[in-house]
Amino acid sequence: MELGGRGNLPALISFIMKKWFFFLPFILGLMACGQDNTDTENLFPELPSYFPDPVYPVDKFPVTQAGFDLGKKLFNDPILSVDQSIACSNCHVKAVAFVDPQHALSLGVNERHGIRNAPSIANMAFMKEFMWDGGVVHLDFVPPNAIENELEMDEKLAHVVAKLNRSSVYPAMFKNVFSGIDTITAPLMLKALSQYQLMLVSKASKYDKVRQGKDQFSADESKGYEIFKSKCAACHSEPLFTNQGYFNNGLDVVFPDLGRARITEDLGDLGKFKVPSLRNVALTAPYMHDARFKSLMEVLNHYSDGVKDSPTLAAPLKSGSQLGIALTLAEKQSLIAFLGTLTDHELISDPRF
Amino acid sequence: MKTLIKLFTLISIITFFSCGDDDTSTTTGSMEVEFDNIAIVNGIEQQLSLVTAGSTSYGYTNSLGQKFNINLLRYYISAIELETTDGKVYKDVLEVSATGSKGYYLIDEANPASQVVELDNIPAGKYSKITFTVGVDSTGVLNGATGGALDPATSKMFWNWNSGYIALKFEGQSDASNGGVSGAETVTTTNPNGIAYHIGGWKNIAGTAFVYNNKRISFNFDTDAVVDAKSAPHVHMTFDVMGLFNGHHKVDFTGNHNVHKPSDGVDMAHNMEEAFNFDHIHQ
């Protein structure tokens, strides 16, 4: 009896019907295992070959359409703030790679000002620690810092959860994402917000297209890339353009914001801040944790001529008595041309976000 | 046909056992561990009484003669281990997910039910030692948002700015305090006499300055706790709140009334460790 080949289905069925008792034990045994063999939906994008694996366990927590939609709705909903006035998207605006284009320091409820500049939240999936001081160790734990900070949303997680449970739309959306739940809880809300943020992957800039052989740098961009590799890449390492370390880049000699030392409680970390990614940097002005520089040229002028010495200054910014990074005006212009190739127009125009 | 039936049975059995189900041949039982919060005053054990925040009724006095009261006392117990007289160790399972957690217990003075920890599926045996962690170690933090006892909204024990759980939270009032506490749950910033001690810090990383304030504590029982299918012993532990202030390090409410970061909590974490005690067992 031949079982293979097209059109032989009736023969196969007939064979199984006749010998069903032979297959039954396997079926019974396997059913006892309760294994779920369905393919799990995961919207998390394919990554370029030179990208690292995400730090967030996207295999354990796959991004589903329903989870993403819920996270997106929460991200854009001022229900997260105490007076329904501020959403995540107020300070993380898509058009400028998810930073705040209007306010140097984040503007919270009742016109209160935060203490630091809102950083881009692209490529959070790849980050080990979050915030300028790295105090947050998991993406899920990022949103409560805005929600419960009295200078930002000034709300309490328990109260947000109560509002979501009273809403006419959220309970059904949560039940659709998290099967079997009775009520909305804070950890479920945080997992949903992560679903949205995980998808904000910046990987389609001109730089990426050049790396993939689909585009070419101009002569100036190319010159800038060479300068970048020799003078900037130690901290702003490719392909995320941050080594995720904490460094004092010579902004100050006294430190009203302790930076990393606030978390480590180690004076050796005074004035150190997390190296920000330079992806989309042309869009994310103003710069530095306190937003003191308005343009990329001001930033480069700081590195060439403005670096101040202190005990915690990053070693690459000091050689002997020479402070900073030697850069000519022409080199700065080339660097700025290169940095422009890190703008990801696909990300900021993606209708999904 | 007989051969086929035998084959059928054999394959069913083999396939079933290939699932790796637990071996259930060992007898198991359960145990209750109660954490009783007390105040030992002049050698006499008193049950705690909480007052509403803002109350100026002071029921307790520290060893420096400063009067105080208590609005809130809450702490985490986790990673409980029991050891038999012949050295076999039972470990309470630690599990975390967005919908719940296992093995983390939030003991809250305001919630009597929270003060009794139920341990199940303990292999039968004579247990003579208990070990537990006060606080939440890396497993409870590094897996992200977690439900159950670790839900940050309901526990109110999570530090957003420096991700991690407060091991022990105490809030109250003392006429010796200068007030102005920040970041407290019950005491307002405008309270002229508030005291708030949030003891935390879980990053136990060699070669760094991170402060680790969780404490791993062991106690030997005075009599063996016999666990089997019929008997479920009740282990009675105590936590003496006076020890938090009068222990190894004397806490002066004038000047030291507001602890909200790991380095400020080191001395009190030491006191906290010594304020736990094994009391007795009901067999």
Image (cartoon, coloured by chain):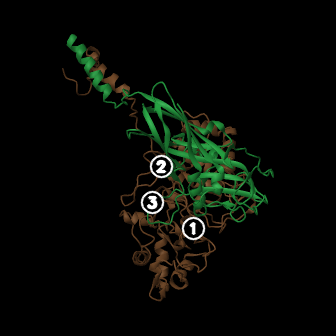
Q: What residue is pinned by disc 2?
A: B139
Which residue occupies the foreground of this view, A29 or A24? A29
- Say which element carries label 1: loop
> Which chain comes out green in the rendered image?
B
Relative height, residue A2 to residue A206 (above, below):
above
Place of residue A246 in the rendered image (x, y in percent of width and height, measured from the top left) = 50, 69
Asked whether the residues under the numbered discs 3 and 2 touch, taking CB atoms below 8 Å apart as contact, a structural biologist would say no
Query: Would you say B172 lies left or right of A12 here?
Result: right
Question: How far separated are the C-alphas under marks 3 and 2?
Answer: 31 Å
Tell me where residue A158 sits by quadrant.
Answer: top right
Relative height, residue A82 to residue A305 (above, below):
above
Place of residue A268 in the rendered image (x, y in percent of width and height, measured from the top left) = 51, 73
Place of residue A7 in the rendered image (x, y in percent of width and height, measured from the top left) = 27, 24
Q: In which quadrant is the N terminus of chain A drawn?
A: top left
Q: Chain of mark 2?
A: B
Tell me where residue A118 sits by quadrant.
Answer: bottom right
> Which chain comes out brown in the rendered image?
A
Of tags 3 and 2, which is closer to the observer? Answer: 2
Q: Residue furthest left?
A: A1
Q: What residue is pinned by disc 1?
A: A284
Using the rendered image, report if marks 1 and 3 lie on a common chain.
yes
Q: Amino acid at mark 1?
A: Thr
Q: Amino acid at mark 2?
A: Thr
Question: How far separated are the C-alphas under marks 1 and 3?
Answer: 16 Å
Residue A203, disc: 3
Which residue is at a point 57% across and 35% down the rendered structure image?
A181
Number of other residues with Cα within 10 Å of mark 1, as a class: few under 14, some 14 to 19, many 20 or more: many
Residue A70: in sight, yes or no? no
Place of residue B46 in the rendered image (x, y in percent of width and height, measured from the top left) = 69, 43
Using the rendered image, report if marks 2 and 1 lie on a common chain.
no
